[in-house]
Amino acid sequence: MVTYQQAKEATIEDLYKVEGKAEIVNGKVVLMPPTGDEPGRAGGSVYISLRQHERQSQSGRAIPDNVAFAVNLPNRKAFSPDAAFFTGKPAGMKFPVGAPAFAVEVRSENDYGKVAERQMAEKRADYFAAGTLVVWDVDLLSEEVIKSYHAGDPETPKIFRRGEIADAEPAVPGWRMPVDELFS
């Protein structure tokens, strides 16, 4: 992540002017570099599966990568997950207001190590503080491919591996996705 330099505390209006994916954290616009082939496809696979569920269930909205969610936390004003499921009001051409019910963060090649782990834990805590029910930490290089964190027990993830069927209960009722779809 790269912090965008500005003289004043960043606002949602500032975020509309940023080219590329970004979030507002601690008053600064934080740019997010483009992802690689496999992480991008994995996030896309989750979105496609969520979109199919949206059409069948007629509830909530599947949101793809590069969409910012405007939130109002003391240290964060926006999230931009790799895929999400949103149950709030449609926002037209603006950012959805409020946190997604379900957020997916797919690790890229630079999302490893102590600093990255701390940043990811802090971001999950922010998601939960904003009202997100379930956050997936997707690690394509691990045996534990999906760590599914729940707002009710944010320190103990439910683990999904290859060959298993993952869910995001209670955030996306009835939705299931084979973990292997992240790799195809």
Image (cartoon, helix red, strand yellow):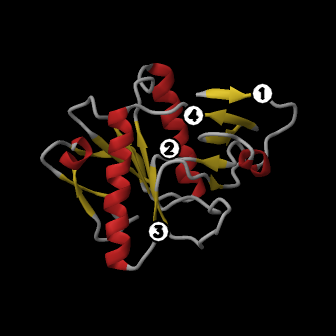
Image quadrant where residue 10 sits: top right
Of mark 4 and mark 2, the one earlier in the sequence is 4
Near-viewer residue (50 or 168): 50
- Identify the residue shown where x is 22% and y is 49%: 181
Q: Secondary structure at mark 2?
A: helix
The residue labelled by disc 1 is 5
Residue 35 lies, with reference to residue 162, above or below; the image says above
> Are the residues tagged 1 and 2 within 8 Å (C-beta)?
no
User: What residue is drawn where x is 55% and y is 37%?
Assistant: 122
Residue name at image x 57 percent, y 34 percent: 32
Label 3 vs label 2, nearer the camera: 3
Q: Amino acid at mark 3?
A: Arg
Alpha-carbon span between mark 3 and mark 2: 21 Å
In the image as oriented, which residue stretches furthest toward the left? 163
Q: Tell me the distance, in whole angstroms, between the alpha carbons under discs 1 and 3.
A: 33 Å
From mark 1 to mark 2, how far is it between C-alphas?
A: 24 Å
**Identity of the amino acid at label 4?**
Met
**Among the two numbered marks 4 and 1 on one chain, the one whose residue lies closer to the N terminus:** 1
Q: Position of residue 152 (x, y in %)?
A: 43, 56
Name the secondary structure under disc 4: loop
Which badge, 1 or 2, comes first in the chain's sequence? 1
**Labels 1 and 3: the sequence-earlier one:** 1
Q: Circles 4 and 1: CB distance less than 8 Å?
A: no
Residue that mark 2 sits on? 124
Q: Which residue is mark 3?
A: 61
Residue 19: quarter of image: top right
Distance of mark 4 from mark 2, alpha carbons? 16 Å
